[in-house]
Amino acid sequence: MTHEGGIKIPRARPDRIIPVAPVDRLIRRAGAQRVSSSASERLAEILEYIGTQMAKEALRFAQHAKRSTVTSADIDAAFLQGDARESPLKISNLTFCSSIP
């Protein structure tokens, strides 16, 4: 797959946790007829960042409960916690995208 400028962008990278192809399908499922490689790649980066932050928060909940297993309840709590306060998990905070690695 090539970028708009003709630069080849790999669809799968060893450092990527979330593959780009499913992200491309996600964008298309949202209604896009055409999706650039850079858009899919960027959304994959953002989803990985948000997922990592949520996982860290869920781990914090599990550790607070003196458990080593992260449960779906921890994930739900991390999601709700992020939605309830100013945090990188808050959906309205996605304007900070330039700070995502």
Image (cartoon, helix red, strand yellow):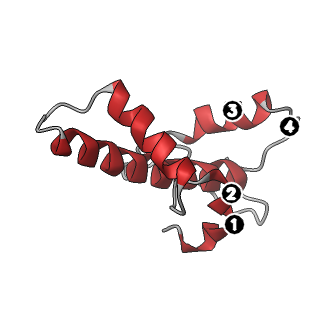
**For the residues marked 3 and 4, what is the alpha-carbon distance in whole angstroms?**
9 Å
Provide the secondary structure element on which disc 1 rests. helix
Residue holding disc 2: 92
- Residue 86 lies left or right of residue 8; in this view the side is left
Give the camera-side residue of 26 and 13.
26
Report which residue position mark 3 lands on.
26
Separation of disc 1 and disc 2 at Cα?
Answer: 7 Å
Identity of the residue drawn at 57% across and 41% down:
20
Taking the spot 17% from the left edge, 38% from the top edge, the residue there is: 65
Q: Earlier in the sequence, mark 3 or mark 1?
A: 3
- Of callouts 1 and 4, the N-terminal one: 4
Q: Position of residue 13 (x, y in %)?
A: 44, 49
How far apart marks 2 and 4 lie (CA) works out to 22 Å
- Residue 100's place in the image compared with 45, above or below, is below
Residue at mark 3 to residue at mark 2: CA–CA distance: 20 Å
**Earlier residue among tags 2 and 4:** 4
Task: Give the labeled residue for mark 4.
Answer: 32
Please tell me whether mark 4 sits on a helix, a strand or a loop.
loop
Whole-angstrom CA distance, mark 3 to mark 1, is: 20 Å
Q: Secondary structure at mark 2?
A: helix
Cβ–Cβ under 8 Å for marks 3 and 2:
no
User: Which numbered disc flags the more N-terminal residue, 3 or 4?
Assistant: 3
Q: Amino acid at mark 1?
A: Thr
Spot occupied by residue 9 in the image (x, y as percentages of width and height): 60, 55
Q: Tally the numbered discs.
A: 4
Q: Residue at x 12, y 35 (%)?
A: 68
Q: Residue 87: where, in percent of width, then height?
A: 51, 61
Contact (CB < 8 A) between labels 2 and 4?
Answer: no
